[in-house]
Image (cartoon, helix red, strand yellow):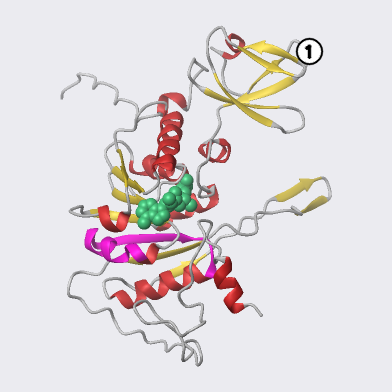
Amino acid sequence: MDSTPSAPPSEPTGADHRRGLFKPGDQVQLTDAKGRMSTITLQAGKQYHTHKGSFEHDELIGSPEGVVVKTSGGNEYLALRPLLSDFVLSMPRGAAVVYPKDAGQIVQMADIFPGARVVEAGVGSGALTCSLLRAVGDSGSVHSYERREEFAEIAAKNVRSFFGAEHPAWELTIGDLAEKLVDEEVDRVVLDMLAPWDCVDAVAKALVPGGVIVCYVATTTQLSRTVETLRTHGAFTEPQPWESMVRGWHVEGLAVRPDHRMIGHTGFLVTARRLADGVTPPVRRRRPSKGAYAADYAAEGATPAAGSVADPEFNEDGTVTSSVARRVLP
Ligand SMILES: C[S@@+](CC[C@H](N)C(=O)[O-])C[C@H]1O[C@@H](n2cnc3c(N)ncnc32)[C@H](O)[C@@H]1O
């Protein structure tokens, strides 16, 4: 039997910034007695200033997480490394980010596995990219496409800042996914953009049989068009749309109840699987309910009836443009 001790496996990218004693370069989330948070990056010899005095970063360097630091004016702060869910909500943003609750759903329902080859568009601020990179690990690949260079730059900074280094599994391409996604074979595709239906053809060519597409859209009109496009395309299984809601709870003595406030809406998710080439999808047994498709209904590729909103134009945040709103509202 070979008793030679094997070398310890090298740490996955970013893991050294997630545990152990605080060291220079680590991000630290400071929470005061009122629950207000701020994030600092530790630097030897630097001070953190507040309206009630300051403290030296050196007081934290070498300490374990979960310690309390006191400013010269007596303010106390709990010091913890920000979790990924904290980081994405406080990092600089270009476009709106995928919320942590949805990122969790995407990683799970798109079945993002270690070593997977994933394509993502658009990259926006890079929030979802961080979750995807974590899930595929150093041996996988995440190829992100973003058509706006200024957003890509913000995302690149955020991803680097979160992992504390360039991630070996990440590639970022500037441009429109529908045009740039060629000659790539991938296991999973995640679309978070205004018009995912424009990319469905390109995605169908890139996805392996059995591969998963997940689309994240903000509005019901986008949801409808995404589902109908996937359904009528022919290369995909019946799309599965859903949304998730997370409600926090207040638990204090006898006062145990849901929080009064919650994030009521973020977006809708749709998944579908790539069929093998040449396979005709099984016929849907369930007929659409009567009236589901009105006479003027326009599926992808058909001409919408004059004045209908089957083919609306969208703003960047997913709302319908005011010209469309004027057409349909009295
Ligand atoms: C809501 S943001 C994405 C946010 C990102 N998922 C995150 O978590 O930070 C949508 C982005 O998609 C980009 N985009 C829209 N259509 C695109 C396309 N066809 N190809 C590449 N990027 C696209 C937009 O420029 C925008 O930055």
Residue displayed at 43% across by 43% down = 131
Report the number of discs. Answer: 1
Amino acid at pointer 1: Gly
Q: In the image, what residue occupies the spot 32% across and 65% down?
A: 200
For mark 1, give the secondary structure: loop
Q: Is residue 238 visible?
A: no
Question: Looking at the picture, how far across and down is residue 126, in whole percent?
Answer: 44, 42
Please give left or right for residue 54 compared with residue 94 in the image.
Answer: right
Which residue lies under the disc numbered 1? 73
Q: Quadrant of residue 66?
A: top right
Placement of 130 over or under 293, stated as above or below? above
Identify the image quadrant of the N terminus. top left
Between 18 and 162, the one nearer to me in the picture: 162
Q: Residue 163 is drawn in which quadrant?
A: top left
Indicate left or right for 223 with 259 as reference: left
Region rendered in magenta: 198-220
Residue at 40 percent across and 29 percent down: it is 14
